[in-house]
Amino acid sequence: MSMTAFLGRRLLQLVPTLIFILIVVFVLVRLLPGDPASAVLGDRALDADVERINRELGLDRSLPVQFVAFAKQVFTGNLGNSIAMKIPVTQLIRDRLPITMLLTFMAAVIAIVFAVPLAFVAALKRDRLPDSAIRGAFQVGLSMPVFYVGLILLTVFGAKLRWFPVGGYGDGFLDHIYHLFLPAVTLALSLSAILMRNLRSAIIGVVDAEYVTFARAKGLRSNLILFRHILRNALISTLALFGLSIGTLLGGAVITETVFAVPGAGRLMVDSIYGRDYPVVQGLTIALAVLVSVTFLLTDILQAWLDPRVTK
Amino acid sequence: MTRLSLIATTAAVLLSTTALVQAQERGGIMTYGRYADSMFLDPVLNDANVDIWILSNMYDTLLLPTDDGQSVQAGLATDWSVSDDGLMVTLTMRDGIMFSDGTPITTDDVIWSLDRARNPDNGIWNFLLAAVSEVTAPDDKTIEIKLAQPDPAILPALSVFNAAIMPKAAFEAMPGETDLEKATAFAEKPIGSGPFVFDSWERGSTLKLVKNAHYWADGEDGEKLPYLDGVTFEVIPDDATRILRVQSGELDGAELIPFARVKELQDDPNINMELFPSTRVADIIINVRPELAGEANPLSDVKVRQAMNYAANKDAIIQVVTFGVGTPTSSFMSSTTPLHTGEGAVFPYDLEKAKQLMSESGYPDGFSASILTLAGNQDELGIATALQQMWSQIGITLEIQQVDNATRTDQYRAGTFDMRAGAWTNDIADPNQITSYFAYSPTIDALHSGWKSEEVDSLFEASQSELDTTKRAEQYARIQEIFNQDGPTVLLYETPYPVALQDNVKGFNQIPLGNNIFREAYLEKE
């Protein structure tokens, strides 16, 4: 199969996936106990107010009717208005999602920057002191809860040393990066541990492979062997893992954004679920699903480029 | 004297006077950490405390609550009177008042704003002005509010956020057909006449207010308030992070400090840990319906409820949950609520009495029941855990169910819960709001508990139009007596609002109704 056909097939696969997600999220938020009016109005709501608001929102209609209305909206690019904030969901997504994307991207970069060289050192010094030290350190990183790591980093590098701001998002692109550095490191920690372990085993596997022995026998320079043969082949499985981890990373962003007071989509999602703000939960889920799907697609393309057998 | 030494002497004199007089200093932006962002900045159509507690900085009302939250003072109106029959309120508007955009505030704006606020189709707060039948202006300085029946709480009601005066023309010029659509557009960049003006808002992150150059009130120095150039609200949901940011000097103040951290911050020499008196009360609400899920409900037995009250050691709960910051409630309403009666815990801890009451009740061998608490809320979990242990001594097995707020509200409204932890803060400087929700059955079934007292209901109805303050006080005393003794609650404690401020922040106030008042706040220069 050509690369174009491969791409076309993968893009077509996105459509049923998104429709499925649309249905699932619509049903799931409505299965949660409580309705938006009571959630927003709280304990003091009078029955008449709850009924009036639910009627205004069309929530007194049957589920199929509501779903058709919702699907119509989605296909016209309108995700409705937030119930609590009363502004368009698209506006909220446009404001909040890029923040989470930047945070996730920074975390991914940091994770790779840490994981790749260390995986090499660990693999090439297998079972010796550097290997044990690196693996031990990452084990600690992997087993610590995200919010706890976040608080430690905030206390040490924010409040005590004052190298970084204690949370917030700042003004302007460079300031955003500065503000997001600690949260990104927090978020990167567990991902880099996973990547490092995986890449280390992959390298070990490749180092012993016949083609590497053959390359050495041919007298190729070790740098060339390292990058062209070992890294390229070892990266294939790690890349797949990395793509799959993006979803997890976005999940981790929810906690990280709360601890570091980053006004991203993760926090918006949690607040909206608590507030039963159906349109925001639905709209945000769709946006995140598209984002994750696109990431998977990019990972697939990259994998296909590294290993043409994938498209076969 | 050389020029240099003259400057030095002058500077020294100036510095020493400043130190002596402690004058209010002008300028600077105060940054304030909030636990959650506002949602909708319209005084009439908002739904939650996150909005209410800052609206008063942007919008002004005819009357303002006093600093102790118990009474009213002059706002956009300088004089006010209620007719002898209680059916007419007459107010005189202040001279030369303007909205923040510089347009004058007219009687037309007042009439339109109050009509909008009392419209039953608008929002959930219109009940506060339910007695109003007509608002008119006989001349351009006077507002007359006609009432369908006397309302002793009408003056405090005029000081509540929903009675804020808004610019009619600017609002009506907004795009949209309905009031909600116009309000949505207006609330994106609201115009009011409060001490501060909306500047910018990045949702979930920062809300910036700047000084209103047209504000009417004067400061101690004879110049216009506010002293600050602006206030920036930063949203920091995590308690620990909010505190860290105050400690690192990045914030001038932060609200909702967990009680567990109050002592530590009180010991911090750079931080002024304020505990502002509040109307906040914490209690357990009990479902007293005779049957629950088709079975007889032990909680409907008044002796059982009294036993639970006596067996709950409030002092211990206050120590465990609020780290000693709270005080036992002497009534269902806080001691800062007007017409509150009582002193000390209504049911002082007495295990023997509790056991005695249990043995006299229909359930001498005890029973099992559950309590709903808010997932992630350490205070409620602490209360429930303490009660679990305390009530086990009178034979009650308590199962703790942690749920999210919407789930809890759902069960609450459906009347399918056994017990739930609850907290309340008044929005108005009058006992009528809390009493309507807690004790008067037609509103929400006495907190959805199913409790009903004919006497309380008729006393409350009478008190709603009772103009004789002594008689009204007597009515409320009786209501409290009945409710406290056999009502559907376990009364726990009242707590102040803990706010951590930098040492140089002066003049900030959080009134007992929760509103954050920045109009006289200033930052003392080091």
Image: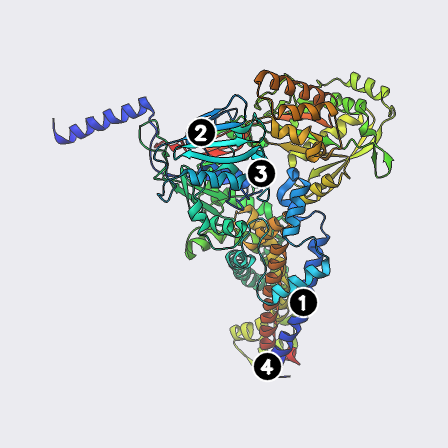
Mark 4 in CB contact with mark 3 (< 8 angstroms): no
In the picture, the quarter occupied by the C terminus of chain A is bottom right
The residue pinned by badge 4 equals: A4
In the picture, the quarter occupied by the N terminus of chain A is bottom right
Q: Distance between the residues labelled 4 and 3?
A: 60 Å
Q: Choose the circle earlier in sequence order: 1 or 4.
A: 4
Q: Distance between the residues labelled 3 and 1?
A: 41 Å
- Chain that bears disc 4: A
Residue A211 % position (x, y): 63, 78
Q: Nearer the viewer, mark 4 or mark 3?
A: 3
Q: Residue B67: in sight, yes or no? A: no
Q: Nearer the viewer, mark 3 or mark 2?
A: 2
Instruction: Give the residue type that dot 3 points to.
Output: Trp
Q: In this view, does B121 lie above or below B156?
A: below
The residue pinned by badge 3 equals: B125
Around disc 1, counting alpha carbons within 10 Å, would you say few (fewer than 14), some (14 to 19), or many (20 or more)?
Answer: few
Q: Which of B313 and B153 is in front in this view?
A: B153
Q: Choose the circle earlier in sequence order: 3 or 2.
A: 2
Do the residues at pointers 1 and 4 share their chain?
Answer: yes
Query: Quadrant of the rendered structure where residue B152 is?
Result: top right
The residue pinned by badge 2 equals: B91
**Secondary structure type for disc 4:** helix
Instruction: Give the residue type that dot 2 points to.
Output: Leu
Q: Distance between the residues labelled 2 and 1?
A: 60 Å
Q: In this view, does A105 lie to the left or right of B364?
A: left
Do the residues at pointers 2 and 1 share their chain?
Answer: no
Residue A123 % position (x, y): 61, 64
The residue pinned by badge 1 equals: A19
Q: Residue B227: in sight, yes or no? A: yes
Around disc 2, counting alpha carbons within 10 Å, would you say few (fewer than 14), some (14 to 19), or many (20 or more)?
Answer: many
Do the residues at pointers 3 and 2 share their chain?
Answer: yes
Around disc 3, counting alpha carbons within 10 Å, would you say few (fewer than 14), some (14 to 19), or many (20 or more)?
Answer: many
